[in-house]
């Protein structure tokens, strides 16, 4: 299906907007709904069912009821359902692309990329479902035999963010299903439609009733209340550090197996022997994807002082080529921010940087012709930002390149690590040994060398320090939903 064949109004009308509980789309208790806004206009997009505590409990009851049978389902059968889900999502790529761009405001190219990325988790874990293995060995002391059996953790609760409305849910759901776990999931209230579309895909792919329930809500505590339920065995969260740590602490009260993917503050280190064209080109992905609203987006651009001016020139020229517009406009390279809250945060950080003496190289004003009321912020390049500016320490989550300089590798590594966060980092050098020495010194869970794209369903995703606990994707991702059981034999 081509861009011109998408009827956005029909797409929204035909996308489920009810709760998905026990294999059925149902209204919320009392018919309650909440409004989803279109960030490109600031106007209402649609109304979606808002789960109450009772609705969330009903969904989790179904999750728990389905657990025993789903865990006993042959791995090949689970795998085939996951593969059919992948195929369904690929078949409906354009519908999902426009749906995400409508509710998130993200440019179509970025949304199309996420559909490819998110759907791939179902193919990856379809393959991993049949490869779960344990271990058999003799005890070193000769006292018996050791069997290690991997079994599903059990009923799971997932809470996902708004910035990747398909992929963040897909890599949790796909891993859980592959392992034999059932799940209740709450999508972000800004972007619930994509997960409800996924619920339809799972149903069409033959997922048994109750194995996955999707419960959007305008009041998050209605679902997070499930952390008090003694039947919950696994909690997985992607979102802000503050909220994740609070919910993680709640889960710890009952020793619930937990994985958290939290905030980042990614350094983008351009060493003195970097190829400037490569370093500037990679900004298109590392910063401008999703208008900078990405947890692994480059946040602190640390550039060797000897090449600072050349880098600033190259990156300013590159970003100035990007067209800002409505998310569903095929001519847009990047779209608005997700809401008034994000817009105000980015404005605050840039205004504060300017108050600390920053030089602005790009981003003085918005282009003309943008919809009034949309949450637009222009691509911005800053340098010479004084000490004490908030932009040095806070995650920007917007299309802002903030450049500062260093004079040695040790200084670059020290400054890169001068943060409580450690999710991702980027390193640029034409000398591989040089790049690896710096990459190994940076305290993050992931490092990209000479590239701006980092995520891969076949690789472990996650951070260190206050950026989270656990890994998603890769060979490691399925183990977040498995527990090794030791069986001792004579």
Image (cartoon, rainbow, N blue to C red):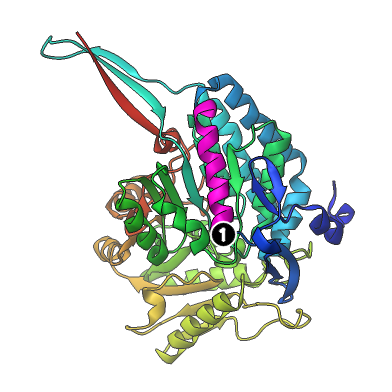
Q: In this view, does 325 lie to the left or right of 429?
A: right
Give the prevailing secondary structure in the magenta stretch. Answer: helix
- Say if the magenta span includes residue 359: no
Task: Indicate the position of residue 254 as horizontal and vertical percent values.
Answer: 31, 48
Task: Indicate the position of residue 34 as horizontal and vertical percent values.
Answer: 67, 68
Q: In this view, does 157 lie to the left or right of 190?
A: left
Residue span colored magenta? 52-70
Q: In this view, does 477 lie to the left or right of 43?
A: left
- Say if the magenta span includes residue 60: yes
Task: Indicate the position of residue 376 as horizontal and vertical percent values.
Answer: 65, 77
Quadrant in which the C terminus is drawn: top left
Residue at horizontal 60%, vertical 22%? 77
Residue at horizontal 38%, vertical 75%? 392
In this view, the residue in front, 301 or 171, is 171
Task: Indicate the position of residue 192 as horizontal and vertical percent values.
Answer: 64, 58
User: Secondary structure under badge 1?
Assistant: helix
Residue at horizontal 28%, vertical 67%? 418
Using the rendered image of the protein, determine whether residue 170 is visible from the camera's viewpoint: yes
In this view, the residue in front, 65 or 342, is 65
Residue at horizontal 55%, vertical 75%? 342
Picture quarter containing residue 337?
bottom right
Mark 1 surroundings: few (<14), some (14-19) or many (≥20) residues within 10 A: some
Using the rendered image of the protein, determine whether residue 107 is visible from the camera's viewpoint: no
Where does label 1 land, which residue?
281
In this view, the residue in front, 66 or 441, is 66
Picture quarter containing residue 483?
top left
């Amino acid at each position: 299906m081509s861009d011109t064949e998408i009827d956005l109004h029909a797409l929204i009308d035909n996308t489920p907007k009810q709760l998905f509980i026990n294999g059925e789309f149902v209204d919320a208790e009392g018919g309650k709904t909440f409004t989803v806004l279109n960030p490109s206009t600031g106007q209402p997009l649609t109304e979606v069912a808002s789960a109450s505590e009772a609705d969330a409990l009903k969904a989790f009851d179904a999750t728990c009821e389905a657990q025993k049978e789903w865990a006993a389902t042959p791995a090949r059968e689970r795998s085939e359902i996951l593969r059919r889900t992948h195929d369904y999502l690929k078949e409906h790529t354009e519908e999902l692309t426009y749906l995400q761009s409508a509710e998130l405001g993200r440019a179509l190219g970025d949304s199309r990329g996420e559909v490819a990325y998110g759907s791939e988790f179902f193919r990856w874990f379809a393959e991993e479902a049949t490869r779960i293995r344990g271990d058999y060995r003799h005890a070193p002391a000769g006292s018996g035999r050791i069997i290690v059996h991997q079994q599903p953790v059990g009923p799971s609760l997932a809470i996902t963010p708004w910035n990747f409305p398909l992929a963040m849910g897909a890599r949790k759901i796909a891993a859980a299903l592959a392992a034999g776990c059932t799940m209740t999931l709450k999508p972000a209230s800004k972007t619930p439609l994509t997960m409800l579309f996924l619920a339809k895909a799972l149903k069409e792919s033959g997922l048994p009733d109750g194995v996955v329930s999707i419960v959007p809500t305008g009041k998050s505590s209605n679902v997070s209340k499930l952390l008090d339920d003694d039947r919950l065995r696994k909690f997985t969260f992607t979102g802000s550090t503050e909220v994740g740590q609070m919910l993680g602490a709640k889960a710890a009260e009952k020793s619930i197996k937990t994985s958290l993917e939290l905030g980042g503050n990614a350094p983008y280190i351009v060493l003195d022997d970097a190829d400037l064209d490569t370093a500037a080109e990679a900004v298109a992905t590392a910063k401008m994807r999703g208008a900078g609203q990405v947890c692994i987006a480059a946040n602190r651009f640390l550039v060797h002082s000897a090449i600072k001016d050349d880098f600033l020139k190259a990156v300013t020229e590159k970003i100035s080529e990007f067209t800002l517009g409505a998310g569903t406009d095929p001519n847009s390279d990047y779209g608005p921010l997700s809401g008034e809250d994000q817009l105000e945060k980015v404005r605050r950080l840039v205004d504060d940087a300017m108050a600390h003496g920053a030089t602005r190289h790009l981003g003085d004003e918005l282009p003309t012709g943008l919809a009034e009321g949309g949450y637009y912020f222009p691509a911005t390049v800053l340098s010479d930002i004084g000490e004490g500016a908030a932009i040095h320490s806070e995650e920007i989550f917007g299309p802002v390149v903030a450049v500062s300089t260093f004079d040695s590798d040790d200084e670059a590594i020290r400054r890169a690590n001068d943060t409580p966060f450690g999710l991702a980092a980027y390193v640029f050098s034409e000398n591989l040994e040089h790049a690896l020495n710096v990459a190994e010194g940076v305290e993050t869970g992931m490092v990209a060398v000479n590239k701006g794209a980092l995520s891969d369903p076949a690789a472990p995703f996650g951070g260190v320090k206050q950026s989270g606990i656990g890994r998603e994707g890769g060979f490691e991702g399925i183990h977040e939903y498995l527990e090794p059981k030791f069986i001792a034999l004579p």
